[in-house]
Image: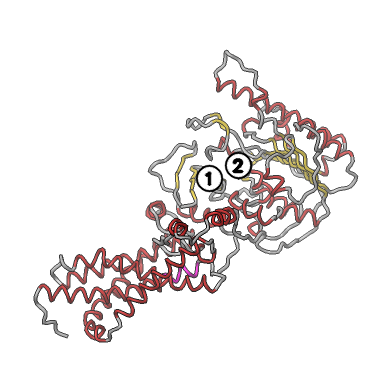
């Protein structure tokens, strides 16, 4: 076809017409690529949710592609005089845009996040990671997309007038426009009335910002504010369903019927176990199995959640709402274990009553003011009345939690030195109670039939990071996470292990070596056997808001939006550092592995 339009207005008109059709076919291509988001997102359960997914898919990609055309290419039709140069620029722009979309689909599939500055930085700077290599393979398609865009450009240029004569441009534009507007109107309603099959799709597509209009609806009598606030409270308590364990457990032998006693000296940092502060516990570590590089799964009380469930703290809300007990306890119940629990605080942390020990019998007297001595005495009384084995008991010591009660201020010392003095005095008190427990087991001849684990829920910091951090819950340094893990296991030789271990490893160890479970640890835990000395990429800690991926050389703290901060081994901020992509991807994947996949 020969173009006879040589005037400026004629050239511009021709390029505008070509641009519209070029944009339309790229909308179709972007929609096809966008099906990857649909395949990696939960499928809506209701017909309305499915309808919304369809129209938002059409409307969003139609709007996104056409908006890019209007913002970038359309103005250039008046600036670039050469039709060939304009078409070449358009082809290059479309190639880059579709390549970025492909990368975003890979990001969404791998770590459930769309591209942002943090993900981009990690992607471009992880040159050694194998996962990065997989991502970079996407750029192989860039020249293919470029050639296809060239072919599309030429075809549309030659067929432009024939396409225009079919008079389908306006009906197609109307379809995209109606889908876009209708999807936002439906979302406005769904957001106001908490219709989750639609609101759960909010982040399915990149650059998706559905409209809300609660204030407008309330002003015009379309929304009851009190009813909305009631539903808001209900929605905030809703959680995702979990598969825990992922598979039915298998066994390769009968359990060993050894008793199990877990002692948690709360708030006890690893280096507090020394001959000066805790001589008995130090000797206990030397005479048994001692893990010197052990980390809690959280810098607060949720560390005990990880210890018994073997799951990161982010799962705690779902576990609580589903009323799921630790798989470790379920297997013990099946093997006829008897349970008892004792606490120096009367288990005043809701974590125990509402989650971990929710289905276990209560061994607490109502009219007693609890302290560690009372807890140990009650455990002694219970043990004297225990005639049969096996049993599992838990003792929570809170002396170090309340260490300020042990402080006699010495005016000759600084405030920080008095702080430390009180702390180590409280640790000595905890050491005394641990000795009482072991003495009782020895008197009753139970040491040869009882596994005893001495650990803590988290550590505490004396401002070693120089960030004015005293205590716990403020960062993920080793001072707040590293805790003792001492294991008396009948038949095991005294050994000191220096490899990195985690609270998440305890269920995997007990399930296999005590209870005879042959299933993979990954079926019921995010940890592995404590005795496995092979190197691991990372251990995980955190809470519901953020996670820390800890390696021997660095700690990466990531929030739920994918933003990260990197710290060195001494928890000093590495401002220009970038986390390794495999660590980032595997850590984020672990946080969603146990959720029900509703695809």
Q: Decide: few, some or many residues near mark 2? Use Cα within 10 Å; few <14, some 14-19, many ≥20.
A: many
Judge by depth and name the residue closer to the eye, 154 or 599.
Answer: 599
Secondary structure under the numbered disc 1 in the rendered image: strand
Above or below, 531 against 445 in this view is: below
In magenta stretch: residue 36: yes
Q: Left of 514 or right of it: where is 309?
A: left
Separation of marks 2 and 1 at Cα, in angstroms? 9 Å
Q: Is residue 168 left or right of residue 471?
A: left
Left or right: 22 with respect to 472? left
Q: SS at mark 2?
A: strand
Residue sitting at x 32%, y 76%: 173
Q: Quadrant of residue 488?
A: top right
First reached walking from the N terminus: tag 2 or tag 1 = 2
Residue lying at 44% horizontally and 71% vertically, measured from the top left: 35
Q: Quarter of the image holding residue 490?
A: top right
**What residue is pinned by disc 2?**
295
User: Is mark 2 in CB contact (under 8 Å) with mark 1?
Assistant: yes
Which mark identifies residue 353? none
Query: Quarter of the image containing the C terminus?
Result: bottom right
Q: Position of residue 482 (x, y in %)?
A: 60, 38
The N terminus sits in image quarter:
bottom left
Identify whether 235 is placed above or below 19.
Answer: above
Residue carrying label 1: 550
What is the magenta range?
Answer: 34-40
The percent coordinates of residue 222 (x first, y second) are: 48, 62
């Amino acid at each position: 076809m020969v173009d006879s339009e040589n005037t400026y207005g004629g050239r511009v008109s021709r390029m505008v017409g070509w641009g519209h059709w070029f944009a339309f076919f790229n909308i179709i291509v972007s929609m096809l690529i966008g099906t990857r988001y649909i395949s990696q997102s939960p499928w809506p359960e209701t017909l309305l949710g499915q309808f919304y997914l369809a129209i938002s898919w059409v409307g969003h990609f139609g709007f996104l592609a056409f908006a890019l055309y209007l913002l970038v290419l359309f103005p250039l039709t008046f600036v670039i005089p050469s039709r060939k140069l304009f078409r070449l620029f358009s082809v290059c722009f479309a190639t880059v845009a579709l390549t970025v979309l492909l990368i975003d689909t890979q990001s969404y599939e791998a770590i459930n996040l769309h591209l942002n500055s943090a993900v981009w930085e990690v992607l471009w700077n992880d040159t050694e990671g194998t996962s990065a290599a997989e991502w970079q393979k996407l750029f192989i398609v860039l020249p293919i997309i470029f050639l296809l865009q060239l072919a599309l450009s030429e075809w549309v240029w030659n067929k432009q007038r024939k396409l225009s004569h079919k008079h389908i441009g306006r009906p197609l534009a109307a379809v995209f426009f109606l889908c876009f507007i209708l999807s936002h109107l439906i979302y406005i309603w769904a957001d106001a009335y908490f219709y989750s099959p639609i609101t759960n799709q909010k982040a399915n597509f990149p650059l998706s910002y559905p409209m809300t209009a609660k204030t407008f609806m309330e002003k015009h009598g379309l929304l009851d504010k009190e009813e909305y606030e009631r539903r808001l409270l209900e929605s905030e308590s809703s959680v995702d369903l979990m598969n825990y364990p992922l598979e039915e457990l298998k066994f390769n032998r009968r359990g060993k019927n050894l008793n199990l006693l877990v002692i948690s000296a709360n708030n006890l940092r690893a280096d507090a176990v020394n001959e000066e502060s805790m001589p008995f516990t130090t000797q206990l570590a030397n005479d048994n199995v001692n893990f010197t590089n052990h980390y809690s799964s959280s810098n607060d009380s949720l560390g005990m959640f990880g210890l018994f469930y073997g799951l990161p703290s982010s799962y705690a809300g779902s576990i609580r709402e589903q009323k799921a007990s630790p798989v470790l306890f379920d297997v013990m119940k099946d093997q006829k274990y008897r349970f008892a629990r004792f606490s120096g605080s009367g288990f005043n942390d809701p974590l125990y009553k509402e989650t971990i020990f929710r289905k276990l019998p209560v061994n607490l007297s109502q009219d007693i003011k609890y302290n560690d001595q009372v807890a140990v005495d009650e455990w002694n009384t219970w043990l004297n009345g225990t005639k049969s084995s096996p049993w599992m008991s838990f003792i929570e010591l809170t002396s170090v939690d309340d260490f300020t009660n042990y402080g006699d201020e010495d005016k000759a010392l600084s405030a920080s030195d008095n702080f430390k003095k009180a702390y180590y005095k409280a640790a000595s008190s905890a050491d005394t109670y641990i000795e009482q427990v072991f003495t009782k087991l020895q008197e009753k001849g139970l040491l040869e039939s009882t596994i005893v684990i001495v650990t803590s829920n988290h550590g505490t910091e004396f401002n070693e990071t120089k960030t004015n951090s005293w205590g716990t819950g403020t960062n993920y340094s080793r001072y707040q996470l590293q805790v003792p893990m001492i294991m008396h296991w009948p038949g095991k030789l005294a050994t000191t292990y220096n490899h990195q271990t985690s609270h998440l490893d305890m269920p995997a160890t007990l399930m296999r070596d005590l209870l005879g479970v042959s299933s993979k640890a990954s079926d019921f835990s995010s940890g592995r056997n404590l005795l496995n000395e092979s190197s691991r990429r990372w251990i995980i800690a955190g809470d519901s808001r953020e996670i820390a991926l800890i390696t021997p050389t660095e700690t990466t703290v990531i929030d739920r939006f994918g933003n990260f901060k990197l710290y060195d081994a001494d928890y000093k901020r590495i401002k220009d550092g970038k986390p390794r992509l495999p660590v980032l991807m595997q850590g984020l994947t672990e946080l969603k592995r146990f959720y029900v996949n509703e695809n």
